[in-house]
Structure formats: structure tokens, C-alpha cells
Amino acid sequence: MAEHLQSRQMASFMAPCAPLLLLTLSLCFYGVIQAKPLSDLTSPYLSPATFPASYQKMLKTFKIFAYIPEKLQPFGTAVESLFHDSLLKSSFITTNAEDAHLFYLPFPHDSSRNYRGIVRLIRNLRTDFPFWNRTLGADHFYVSCSGIGMNSDRNIVELKKNSVQISCFPTAEGRFIPHKDVSFPHLNDQHLHAPPGNGTAKYLGYLNLNGSGDQNGKLESTFSNELRGDPQFLVESEASDPALYAERLSSSKFCLFFYGGDVSGIGDALQFGCVPVVITERPILDLPFMDVLRWSEIAVFVGAGGGVEGMKKQLGRTCEGDRYERMKNLAMVAGQHFVWNSSPQPYDAFHTVMYQLWLRRHTIRYARWESI
């Protein structure tokens, strides 16, 4: 299973930043291009044959033991708080640590800089419980939207190298370990509703620059300035009200995002069938749900080096034949996994995060090996 996931992930990791011919040659070199059965072409999932049964098994058997501090400071973001509250109220929680597959470490606010508090927490776990020492934290996980950097303290080193980190996409560079960590999407706007109409796209692409950070300032400026004069693209710099925003998503074939900037709208784009286009200057290793979704079939990744013309050529190739309609339909199916609910629902963002943890439950606990 692990080898299967890694080979699938390799294809998605390399897709963003290579021209089509070079990408094909590279993937063939690494041995990850394989003939897909017909069923794969109609599913956004990496393992469409096993995902439903494995998901149901997770719901029935997955158990988490949570360490609850006497006083927990509030989390720094709403999505961290929602995940924490949803987990503690879920049926995944067990009070019998011996039955647990994984152990949850709730961290205080701003854990990325609160190294002293983390060191103290793990030191206490070593003394008060036997579970950390037996795996050096490999069957533990924690939530930190900003991610945790390296530190020379033994406790931080073990945490960073061994425990599963759940962070927000995109994660700061150097604070995410792809084979181990996972990321979850931002909170979605639950007030969005598809407008009435025939669904005909008015624009080839939609770019909303509102809320974009400084990390991609020059790149965003270059792209947006060229696109503003192109009638095929709609570029906005101000926030839209929910109804207008939903209309923009529904009337555009592609929604443009700059990796490292504001990517909070990717989930909205997927749900409305506006195929995400992620513009990046380096490979992306922290996409949400990389163990679940075949990102190459629900989004387009464009290297920044080709500029706007290179992007338009790639979008043109995507629109050839029935590829675009297939991507749009698969994107809308995948969009259900990006929805956060105050009360978790089947296959939503909370349960998909839990499923990624479920896939990691065998990292160390070989004695409890089960079929996926």
C-alpha cells in the first residue's frame, strides 16, 4: 500500500513544474506511468476500488486516544479549533489507550514558536505514559497550521521527525515532511449556492487577487497585469459578495491560484466545477488529501517559467477532446471532501483528514497489521 501511494504521489509531485514532454519522460524514467483501468478515468480517487470499503472500515474500527491538558489555550485558527472539537466529540475517541491506533497531542496556541511548552508536554508524556517511549512518537499526531520547524531539543527532534503533523495548505517551506505529514484545506464559505443558468462558461479563467500575500507579489503582478487585458480572463482585486462570487466560479472554466499565496478558494472552485489552476515556481508536496485524490485529474499545475502564454497553451491542451469535461466532473466529486461542517458529515473534510490518519496507522504498529 505504501509503495502504491508513493508511486502515485510521485506523479502528482512532478506534474506542476515540467513541460509536457519532459514530464512524460521523467515519469517514465521513475516508472510511475501505468496503464489505468477504465474505472480510474471516471474516479478522482487514487484507489477507487478500495477507498469505499477502507473508509467504512475506518468509521467502524479507528480509535484515537487524546491527551487532554488541564488547561488548553485556544487554537490560532478557526479550522484548527473545528478539527479539534470535531475529533473530541467523534466516535473515534477512546478512553482505553491500549485500544488506540494513534495518539492525539493538542498543542497550545502558536505552537510553531512555543517550543518550551511543547518540550514540557512531551517530557511529561515520557514520565506519565508509556506510549511515547515505545515508538518515539511515531504513532502520535498533532495539529499546527503554521507547522513546526526544527530545533535541537531531543523532544522537538522526535516530534518533527516521527509524529504526524496536520497543517494548513500551503505549509511554510521546510515545515512539511511529505511521506509523513498531511495538510487540510481552509474553511469553505458555506453560504455559496450555485446560481441558476445553463452553466455555460463566460471566461476561460478567473483570478481573484483579494487577500493574496506578499510571497508571490512579483509573480502575481506579472500574471495579473497580462491577464487584465485579455477578454478570456476575469481578474478581480476586491472581495465579492457570496452570490457574485458563486456566479464568478460557475461562469469560469478555470480558477487561478498562486501556490504560496491565498489558496483558500480551491475547495470552492472544485465544488463549482471551476477546475483549479495552480501556478507554482517549485514542486508541490503538501496538497490536501494527496493519499486520497488523484490531483492530476482534478486540477492543472502550471510552472511559472512559461508565463501567461505558457499557461494559456496548457489550458488549451486541457480543453481538447473530452478532457476538460471529465476534469470538471471529477473536480465536483472531489469537492465534497473540502467541505467543513460544524457537525461532521460523511466524506467531508474532517472525515477525509481522519482517513489520511487511518492510512498512517501502520507506520509503527506492525503487531496490529490489518488489510487496508
Image: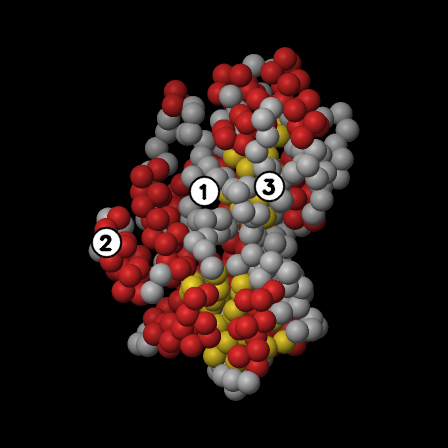
| Few, some or many residues within 10 Å of mark 2 (<14, 14–19, 20+) | few
Frontmost residue, 173 versus 77: 173
Q: Is residue 315 left or right of residue 341?
A: left
Residue 31, image x, y percentages: 24, 48
Amino acid tagged 2: Cys
Q: Do the residues labelled 1 and 3 touch (CB within 8 Å)?
A: no
Q: Alpha carbon of mark 3 to alpha carbon of mark 2: how far?
A: 33 Å
Of helix, strand and loop, which one carries label 2?
helix
What residue would you read off at disc 1? Answer: 178
| Few, some or many residues within 10 Å of mark 1 (<14, 14–19, 20+) | some
Mark linked to residue 147: 3
Placement of the N terminus among the 4 image quadrants: top left
Quarter-wise, where is residue 186 in the image?
bottom right
Frontmost residue, 162 versus 17: 17
Q: Which residue is drawn at 39% across and 43% down?
A: 53
Q: Is residue 319 above or below residue 149?
A: below
Mark linked to residue 232: none
Of helix, strand and loop, which one carries label 1?
loop
Asked whether residue 38 appears in the rendered view, the answer is: yes
Amino acid tagged 3: Gly
Placement of the C terminus among the 4 image quadrants: top left
Instruction: Tell me how the rendering is colored.
Output: secondary structure
Of helix, strand and loop, which one carries label 3?
loop
Mark linked to residue 28: 2
Q: In this view, does 39 lie above or below 318?
A: above
Q: Which of marks 1 and 3 is nearer the N terminus?
A: 3
Residue 63, image x, y percentages: 53, 30
Q: Which residue is drawn at 57% across and 75% down?
A: 224
| Few, some or many residues within 10 Å of mark 3 (<14, 14–19, 20+) | many
Q: Is residue 317 left or right of residue 95?
A: left
Amino acid tagged 1: Pro
Residue 96, image x, y percentages: 58, 21
